[in-house]
Image: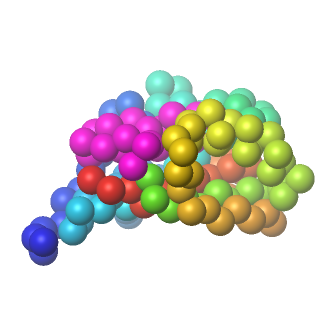
Amino acid sequence: MSNAIEAVSSAAAPAALGAYSQAVKANGFIFVSGQLGIDPATGELAGPGAAEQAAQSLKNLAAILQAAGSDVSRVVRATVYLAHVEDFSEVDRQYAQYFTGAVKPARVAFGGNAIPKGALVEIDAIALA
């Protein structure tokens, strides 16, 4: 395995809000930073609800994985951060539309989070390159 670390970015996902990369590729893995439901065309949250924001977050995540030469079918681990745990069901419905393979990624989801920009959902992932 190479010791190289490569930054990954996509114009089809919003730019990082701070001092971090959209994703980092290293040792055969892609580590995607937490994605908010921000529409990259407007810079604003995709909607007021958790479902709309989750759908956009997943779209952003998929765009970054594509830029890294991978896709959502290669995600091995994901974390879903919710501002309100009560939104879990509607977020999970959006999530299930992206992860349709026989083997779903290992996942953690938890609520009660203060997420930047007042977002309701943030999703990060680790995928195979």
Q: Quadrant of the N terminus?
A: bottom left
Residue at horizontal 50%, vertical 62%? 77
The number of numbered discs placed on residues in the rendered structure image is: 0
Q: What is the quadrant of residue 92 in the picture?
A: top right
Residue at horizontal 56%, vertical 38%? 100
Q: Give the range drawn in magenta.
A: 55-74
Q: In this view, does 25 lie to the left or right of 72?
A: left
Furthest residue toward right: 86
Residue at horizontal 33%, vertical 56%? 128
Furthest residue toward top: 41
Task: Tell me where residue 60 appears, x and y as whole percent.
Answer: 48, 38
Residue 80 visible within the image: yes
Q: What is the quadrant of residue 115 in the picture?
A: bottom right
Vertically, is 41 above or below 28? above
How is the structure coloured here? rainbow
The verdict on residue 113 being magenta is no
Viewer-side residue, 95 vs 61: 95
Vertically, is 61 above or below 124? above
The verdict on residue 56 being magenta is yes
User: Could you tell me what secondary structure mostly forms the magenta stretch?
Assistant: helix
Residue 64 visible within the image: no
Residue at horizontal 61%, vertical 62%? 107
Q: Is residue 81 left or right of residue 83?
A: left
Q: In this view, does 90 lie to the left or right of 109?
A: right
Furthest residue toward front: 102
Task: Tell me where residue 63 appears, x and y as whole percent.
Answer: 39, 36
Viewer-side residue, 46 vs 23: 23
Vertically, is 48 above or below 95? above
Task: Tell me where residue 110 appears, x and y as whole percent.
Answer: 74, 65
Task: Tell me where residue 80 appears, x and y as whole percent.
Answer: 64, 57
